[in-house]
Amino acid sequence: QVQLVESGGGLVQTGESLRLSCVQSGQTFSRSSMAWFRQAPGKEREFVAAIRWTRSLTTYADSVKGRFTISRDNAKNTVFLQMNSLKPEDTAVYYCAFTDAEVIIPRPSHYEYWGQGTQVTVSS
């Protein structure tokens, strides 16, 4: 079993920054990937960014490229999402997700474990 706990959400104004964290505990895997998804009210859950645990290869949604950065701290089993230049359309609940596969696929069904989510609200 894998447990994921997100933190770092909040209310900010347009153009400001937030840093989300996701701590993984439980079973460890030699190969895995972690991702961030988000879901706004009335919309489907959408892919934001992902990182492979080995070699730190990353993938981003077009809507966040150049503004968001995903990174990891292996020693702390933690993944971060640095969000800069936030826009009102970034408002959503952000979820951390984990899979024991190294292939990054930007679909929710690819990930076996999920955190509880953290709210990010960007005011205009």
Image (spheres, grey):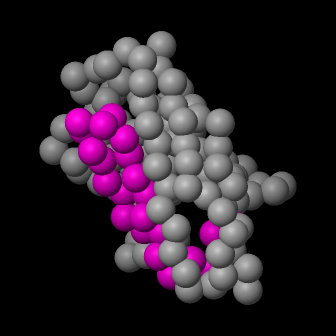
The spot of residue 44 in percent (x, y) is 72, 50
Vertical position of residue 19 compared to residue 6: above or below: below
Occupied quadrant, residue 35: top left
Quarter of the picture holding the C terminus: bottom right
Q: Is residue 8 left or right of residue 57?
A: right
Occupied quadrant, residue 119: bottom right
Residue 100 visible somewhere in the drawing: yes
The spot of residue 113 in percent (x, y) is 53, 26
Q: Total marks drawn?
A: 0
Q: Is residue 45 left or right of residue 65?
A: right
The boundaries of the magenta stretch are 68-91
* Residue lying at 47% horizontally and 42% vertically, measured from the top left: 22
The spot of residue 16 in percent (x, y) is 55, 81
Residue 110 visible somewhere in the drawing: no
Occupied quadrant, residue 15: bottom right
* Residue lying at 37% horizontally and 15% vertically, measured from the top left: 27
The spot of residue 111 in percent (x, y) is 50, 31
* Residue lying at 55% horizontally and 43% vertically, measured from the top left: 6
Residue 84 included in the magenta stretch of the image: yes
